[in-house]
Image (spheres, rainbow, N blue to C red):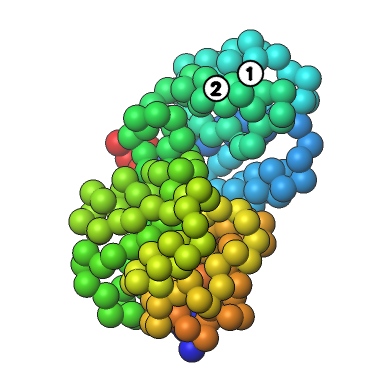
Amino acid sequence: MAIIFDGKSYARKVEDQLYHRIEKLGEKPVMATVIVGEDPASRLYVKLKREAAERIGAEMDVYEFPETVSLKELLRRIDHLNADKTVSGIMVQLPLPKRLKKETDHILAHISPEKDVDGLRENSPFVPATVRAVLSILDQAKTRVSISPDAYTVVVGAKGEVGSRLIGELSKLGYEVGGITHQMKEEDIIKETSSARVVVSATGDSGIIGKEYIGKGAIVIDVGSPKGDVNFNEVREIAGFITPVPGGVGPVTVVSLMGNLVDAVEK
């Protein structure tokens, strides 16, 4: 039976650390969040981030735009926030509405690198919040499950936004990393994942990772949203460590964003 990671409890401990770091700074970090449209999930995520900011003694200003907003108007707002010295970090809540989705990279690239606390623009100095969350959880898992420093790790969803960045960061840390894409045959995917000591899944395809995908005692980190990639009840019987959805990676992603914000101020 796997150890079940409590993301909420871990995130609160990190929040306490960030609160004390902000106290020492003597100034309140300010994060500006741009949100377009009325997507309920996006609005919930913004609410959770604002609440987390308040708990650590930071401030989050939200700039709301209707789906009909022009690209020019969005970029004008980002330019204003880039120039505002009271703003420490800027993030654009994704996904953008369909009519603006093709402009996502262009919009993110407009954020000043030193304020890109979500780490999503190319060559950002910050590790993306979700990737930072996975790395933090992996560090926690290694204190409870015995694995070698260069343990074979498989990322399911390797070509996605999270997967591709995660592979790069894990490689920098010395892990031997394999990537799984949807073009691979199922039997080849199972062969790869079941031989890994660490499996991270970030596809967004609910319940695709069953017990046959996982080797006994492996670390399983589920980045899938909103319902999770992993068949939790099956895999918990095989794995050594597992993150639930909800309550696993999600809370740690929010506090990782806050960590990037505090890092931005300290720099």
Mark number for residue 107? 2
Residue 260 at what x, y percent from top left? 41, 44
Q: Is residue 64 visible?
A: no
- Residue 127 sits above or below residue 185 on the image: above
Place residue 218 in its image quadrant: bottom left
Q: Is mark 1 on a helix, strand or loop?
A: helix
Residue 2 at what x, y percent from top left? 47, 83
- Residue 94 is left or right of residue 256, and the answer is right
Quarter of the figure with the C terminus:
top left
Q: Which amino acid does label 1 sit on?
A: Leu
Front: mark 2 or 1: 2
Residue 38 at what x, y percent from top left? 79, 36
Question: Is there a contact, CB below 8 Å, between mark 2 and mark 1?
Answer: yes
Which is more toward the observer, 104 or 9? 104
Sequence-first disc among 2 and 1: 1
Mark number for residue 74? 1
- Residue 211 sits above or below residue 113 on the image: below
Residue 143 at what x, y percent from top left? 31, 76
- Residue, x 70% and y 14% (percent of image)? 70
Q: Which amino acid does label 2 sit on?
A: Ile
Q: What element carries label 2?
A: helix
State the CA–CA distance, disc 2 to disc 1: 8 Å
